[in-house]
């Protein structure tokens, strides 16, 4: 056949197969391209539609053509999804094959690139393809099972492929010069260590401020599914020598000495974050000058810190008294003098009991404010993650 005859045939074929723009999911002004497959030993002959502004739509070497029925009741995205799945199942797109870019498919089908991206995301979610950052979308090898199925609660948080994270970790160790056997030993050792750390929680502060440990333990115990023990820092080393399983929890005030002991016995040390007490501080800031404020806590350390903070806020404008609830005489003197009393939850029953028993000795009843929590709202959740416990949302 002469070259001129061949060109005429191609033009005639184009004119018969130019599609109309889609009413939805389309880019205005684009038309469909036609791919004619020649004999098996020759590359496909690609013909292109003609853009209405005199330009030409670029083509790419592939033997697959996708048809979108613009007037169908089936959404265009559903049509494209099923056609790509079939092309992959029929090995028109073999494993490892790079799929056309969203731009290429948009020019071939007339669909909007956002629609094609949506289809590709669904294909990836369904395990048909995998996205390689900066490279494109590739057909996933179905012979390689997906070792880890991402739980829905994790997928909703933006982690779409745990397999990829695992492979990245393994590849990093291999690239560092480890063998597969060494990589397995390292990962197993780390997982075993974390399991040991999650066996129990030891809350530790110095004996003189063991009340801080009691406050921390009181709030951790209902939220953790492991035993929580209070251990004075002076006894921590002997406890760890008898059993090195567990995580040691303390406040940031005592983190450094606790870390040294924890490192010596190969356990984890974690500092929990305290409540910012913004509501209590806001109330103290608004008290009129000359008011007497009483602070009651089972932690002497908290009382010392509170004194400093309150003084930095109000200077000598307020009269401040502090007491631990176990010293009855000092607590009573505080209740007699104070117009406002702030206390932690363990101290509240003793404060209320003292008020009832000594009501006749009080010229006026002070306003009692109990701090709702000692720890910040996020620190318990972070601790659960640190020691490898399932989050409450996942458990439900």
Image: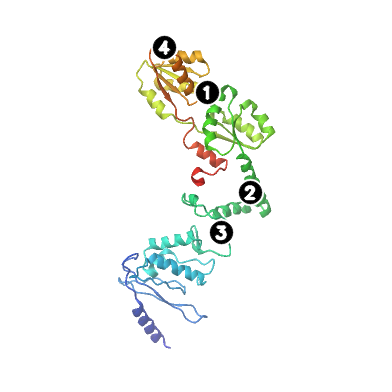
Mark nearer the N terminus (3 vs 4): 3
Residue shown at 56% from the left, 55% from the top: 148
Earlier sequence position, callout 4 versus callout 2: 2
SS at badge 4: helix
Q: CA distance from mark 3 to mark 4?
A: 74 Å
Q: Dot 4 corresponds to which residue?
A: 360
Residue 312 place in picture, x, y as percent: 43, 22
Between 148 and 1, which is closer to the camera in this rendering? 148
Q: Is residue 171 above or below residue 305?
A: below
Q: Choose between 174 and 339: the one closer to the eye.
A: 339
Q: Is residue 274 visible?
A: yes
Q: Estimate the x, y position of residue 327 in percent, counting from the top left.
A: 52, 16
Q: Which residue is mark 2?
A: 187
Image marks 3 and 2: residues in contact by CB distance under 8 Å: no
Residue that badge 3 annotates: 146
Image height of 344 relative to 228, above or below: above
x and y percentages locating residue 378 in the rendered image:
48, 37
Q: Is the residue 85 above or below the residue 161 in the image?
A: below
How far apart marks 1 and 3 lie (CA) works out to 52 Å
SS category of the residue bearing label 3:
loop
Q: Residue at x 39, y 65 (%)?
A: 77
- Label 2 environment density (alpha carbons within 10 Å; few <14, some 14–19, many ≥20): some
Q: Earlier in the sequence, mark 1 or mark 3?
A: 3
Dot 1 or dot 4, earlier in sequence = 1
Could you say where residue 219 lies in the image, as x and y percent from the top left? 51, 32
Indicate left or right for 274 with 196 as reference. Answer: left
Q: Taking the image as drawn, is residue 307 in sight?
A: no
């Amino acid at each position: 056949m002469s070259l001129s005859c061949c060109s005429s045939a191609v033009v005639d074929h184009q004119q018969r197969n130019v599609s109309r723009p889609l009413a939805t999911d389309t880019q205005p002004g684009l038309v469909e391209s036609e791919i004619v497959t020649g004999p098996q030993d020759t590359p496909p002959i690609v013909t292109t539609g003609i853009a209405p502004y005199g330009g030409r739509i670029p083509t790419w070497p592939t033997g697959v053509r996708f048809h979108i029925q613009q007037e169908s009741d089936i959404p265009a995205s559903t049509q494209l999804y099923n056609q790509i799945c079939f092309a992959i199942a029929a090995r028109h797109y073999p494993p490892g094959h790079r799929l056309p870019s969203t731009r290429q498919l948009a020019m071939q089908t007339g669909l909007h690139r956002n629609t094609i991206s949506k289809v590709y995301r669904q294909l990836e979610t369904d395990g048909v393809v995998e996205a390689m950052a900066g490279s494109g979308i590739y057909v996933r090898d179905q012979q390689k099972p997906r070792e880890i199925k991402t739980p829905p609660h994790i997928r909703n948080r933006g982690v779409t492929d745990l397999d990829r994270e695992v492979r990245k970790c393994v590849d990093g160790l291999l690239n560092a010069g480890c063998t597969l056997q060494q990589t397995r030993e390292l990962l197993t050792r780390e997982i075993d260590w974390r399991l040991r750390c999650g066996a129990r929680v030891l809350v530790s502060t110095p004996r003189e401020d063991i009340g801080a440990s009691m406050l921390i333990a009181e709030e951790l115990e209902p939220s953790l599914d492991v035993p929580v023990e209070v251990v004075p820092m002076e006894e921590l080393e002997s406890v760890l020598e008898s059993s090195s399983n567990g995580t040691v929890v303390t406040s940031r005030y005592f983190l450094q000495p606790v870390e040294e002991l924890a490192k010596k016995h190969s356990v984890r040390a974690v500092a929990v974050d305290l409540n910012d007490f913004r509501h209590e501080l806001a109330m103290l800031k608004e008290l009129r000058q000359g008011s007497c404020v009483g602070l009651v806590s089972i932690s002497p350390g908290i009382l010392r810190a509170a004194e400093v903070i309150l003084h930095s806020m109000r200077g000598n404008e307020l009269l401040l008294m502090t007491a631990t609830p176990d010293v009855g005489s000092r607590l009573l003197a505080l209740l007699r003098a104070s117009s406002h009393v702030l206390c932690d939850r363990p101290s509240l029953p003793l404060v209320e009991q003292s008020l009832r028993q000594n009501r006749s000795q009080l010229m006026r009843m002070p306003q009692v404010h109990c701090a709702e929590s000692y720890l910040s709202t996020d620190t318990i959740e972070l601790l659960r993650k640190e020691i490898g416990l399932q989050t409450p949302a996942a458990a439900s």
